């Protein structure tokens, strides 16, 4: 039994959700190999070979993989599949795009967003926005799995020494072409990796006001998130959405500001260790999941919070 | 160009679901059912493409129990032209749905299939990608913008770091994200008109597909409940509690 984990990277380092996928793969009980695909991989291949628990690192360095398009990556996974019983990736936008495509080509029903590994065939996954947890057993010869990163502590970034091995790119008719990307640059920690997350909702009223959150985030080294309503209204960019259909986070501390607590939002943050809610409506459902609730006007509370943290520092 | 839009009947997004006491699943009896919200966005996009003269016909497909016909009617009331119902009482998982949709796509030869990126019941986020694979078509998932020029489709995708645009050659698969559009409400006259639009009924057997599920459901449980905590009276008290009690800052 050997598992192959498709790694996600930025050309320099392997992304943290992939290290959670490696942790999930280790729970299967067999050997774990990792696949690094992209164009110009020399630097990141050195980093990837150090990931603990990985016995072999496959490196597919080709122009076709430069933008992680699903069509060539799925073809690559299918070409490598004969050597593996399990194929995994983190349930990121990339993993969710690529793995089901590979699964269909392998005649396998993918198991999405796995939050617990019971054994090599049996997995737990949230359904209905996390309001129920389903245990499912796969009868497929090859299991294709995306991993809910927030549910598995990532393996360390270093400590292993995998043998790297180049792999050939199989031919694939893409039909798709990368045009452009508009990536949001931020000095802050990534939402899915941050120890503290502070999110704003419709109550923030506009994008400008997110500065109030950022001042607090600066003190706490926090990532800044948002509700769907805040993204839809154009206050902030889509990559900040937390929830059923946005990012799933489980930080040590989650601070929800001006967010009512719809089930779709809770789905993305209710596994946080400590939840704080700041909302002027004491009936807001967010208070039902908050460890500490502050009924207050956020425009008063946020500057006070920043001041208080600055004083304490 | 014909457009195919699969629509799923799911528990309405406003319903707080209840897990059955025997762990066999989520209670769906007597619960309000609606079209999956992402599929509404898909129907809206298809109807807009028809209104712009880019598409010639919009076909709504649903798969499952007879009541899925109502979901098709909703799509017809929004502006789809005709429906196809693949009727079965069997549980359908995304791989089976993708195979059934492939069979329909081979019959109908659409230039574009628009699906919701995920269904809000099983939260799988897989059917569109699988259908693209089975047809050998390119895919543009999690779309927040769609532009069709001649034989190519530019799809702006919501990805973890922001936005990405890919160009797909037709025929292609697109899956919708929340911000692609705001679906319309069907007007009363359009609801009346939809009653006269044709719906063809097929079966998995007629399409030559074995829909047997690959994932066996072992059990369904409720997640651990979070206890509502306490209210604090001031920002100072909050910070003190986070420092000394929760010890997270
Ligand atoms: C298919 C689908 C998928 C979805 N996916 C997601 C998702 O991934 N993530 C997500 O977040 N949502 C998602 N939603 C939307 C979700 O249902 C809610 O509409 C959304 O979360 C509401 O955002 P909000 O809490 O910011 O806004 P609202 O519900 O409008 O709440 C605003 C809150 O701000 C408070 N407030 C206002 N002014 C102040 C002030 N001055 N001081 C303090 N408090 C104030 C109000 O009391 C209120 O509680 C989804 C919905 C659907 C149908």
Image (spheres, rainbow, N blue to C red):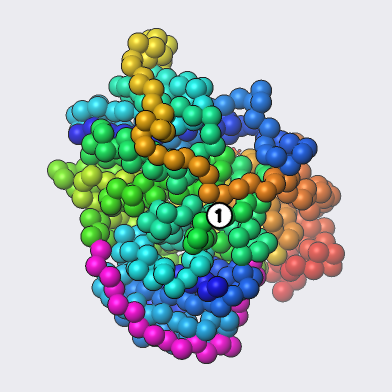
Q: Is residue B210 above or below residue B164?
A: above
Q: Is residue B12 left or right of residue B29?
A: left
Q: Is residue A295 visible?
A: no
Which quadrant would the C terminus of chain A be assigned to in this image? bottom right
Q: In this view, does B49 lie to the left or right of B35?
A: left
Residue A65 rendering spot, x and y as whole percentages: 31, 70
Q: Residue at 30% across / 22% down in the picture?
A: B81
Q: Residue at 68% across / 61% down in the picture?
A: A118
Task: State how many labels appear.
Answer: 1
State the residue position of label 1.
A139
Residue B162 rendering spot, x and y as whole percentages: 41, 58
Q: In this view, does A111 lie to the left or right of B155?
A: right
Res. B16 image quadrant: top right
Determine the secondary structure under disc 1.
loop
Res. A250 image quadrant: bottom right
Please tell me how crowded label 1 is: few (under 14), some (14-19), or many (20+) other residues with Cα within 10 Å.
Answer: some
Q: Is residue B194 visible?
A: yes
Residues A10 and A135: in front is A135
Q: Residue at 41% across / 69% down in the picture?
A: A82
Residue A257 rendering spot, x and y as whole percentages: 65, 50
Q: Residue at 58% across / 63% down in the picture?
A: A149
């Amino acid at each position: 039994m050997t598992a192959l984990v498709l790694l996600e990277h930025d050309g320099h380092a392997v992304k943290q959700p992939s290290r959670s996928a490696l942790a999930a793969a280790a729970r299967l009980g067999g050997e774990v190999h990792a696949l690094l695909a992209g164009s110009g991989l020399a630097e990141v291949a050195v980093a990837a070979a150090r990931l603990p628990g990985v016995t072999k690192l496959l490196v597919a360095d080709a122009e076709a993989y430069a933008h992680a398009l699903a069509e060539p990556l799925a073809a690559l996974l299918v070409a490598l599949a004969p050597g593996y019983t399990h194929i995994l990736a983190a349930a990121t936008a990339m993993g969710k795009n690529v793995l089901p495509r590979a699964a269909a080509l392998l005649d396998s029903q993918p198991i999405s967003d796995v939050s617990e590994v019971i054994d090599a065939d049996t997995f737990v996954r949230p359904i209905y926005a996390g309001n129920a947890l389903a245990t499912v057993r796969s009868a497929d010869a090859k299991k294709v799995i995306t991993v809910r990163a927030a549910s598995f502590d990532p393996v360390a970034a270093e400590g292993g020494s995998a043998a790297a091995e180049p792999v050939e790119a199989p031919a694939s008719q893409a039909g798709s072409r990368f045009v452009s990307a508009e990536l949001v640059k931020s000095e802050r920690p990534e939402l899915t990796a941050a120890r503290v997350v502070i999110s704003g909702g419709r109550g923030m009223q506009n994008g400008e006001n997110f500065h109030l959150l950022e001042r607090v985030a600066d003190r706490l080294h926090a990532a800044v998130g948002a509700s769907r309503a805040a993204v839809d209204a154009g206050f902030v960019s889509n990559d900040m959405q937390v929830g059923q259909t946005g990012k799933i986070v489980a930080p040590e501390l989650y601070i929800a500001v001006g967010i009512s607590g719809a089930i779709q939002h809770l789905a993305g943050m209710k596994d946080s260790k400590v939840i704080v809610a700041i909302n002027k409506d004491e009936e807001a459902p967010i208070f039902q999941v908050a460890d500490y609730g502050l009924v207050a006007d956020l425009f008063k509370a946020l500057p006070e919070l920043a001041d208080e943290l600055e004083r304490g520092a | 160009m014909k457009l195919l839009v699969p629509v799923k009947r799911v528990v309405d997004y406003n319903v707080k679901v209840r897990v059955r006491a025997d762990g066999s699943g989520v209670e769906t009896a007597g619960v309000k059912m609606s079209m999956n919200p992402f599929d509404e966005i898909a129907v809206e996009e298809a109807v807009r493409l028809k209104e712009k003269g880019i598409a010639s016909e919009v076909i709504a497909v649903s798969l499952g129990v007879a009541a899925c016909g109502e979901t098709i009617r909703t799509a017809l009331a929004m502006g789809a032209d005709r429906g196809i119902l693949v009727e079965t009482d069997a549980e359908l998982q995304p791989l089976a749905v993708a195979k059934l949709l492939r069979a329909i796509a081979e019959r109908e030869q659409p230039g574009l299939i628009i699906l919701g990126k995920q269904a809000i019941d099983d939260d799988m986020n897989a059917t569109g990608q699988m259908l693209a694979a089975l047809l050998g078509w390119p895919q543009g998932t999690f779309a927040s913008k769609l532009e069709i020029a001649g034989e190519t489709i530019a799809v702006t995708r919501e990805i973890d770091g922001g936005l990405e645009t890919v160009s797909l050659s037709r025929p292609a698969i697109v899956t919708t994200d929340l911000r692609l559009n705001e679906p319309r409400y069907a007007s009363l006259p359009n609801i009346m008109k939809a009653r006269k639009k044709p719906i063809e009924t097929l079966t998995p057997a007629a399409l030559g597909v074995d829909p047997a599920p690959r994932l066996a459901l072992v059990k369904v449980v409720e997640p651990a409940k979070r206890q509502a905590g306490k209210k604090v009276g001031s920002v100072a008290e909050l910070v003190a509690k986070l420092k000394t009690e929760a010890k997270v800052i």
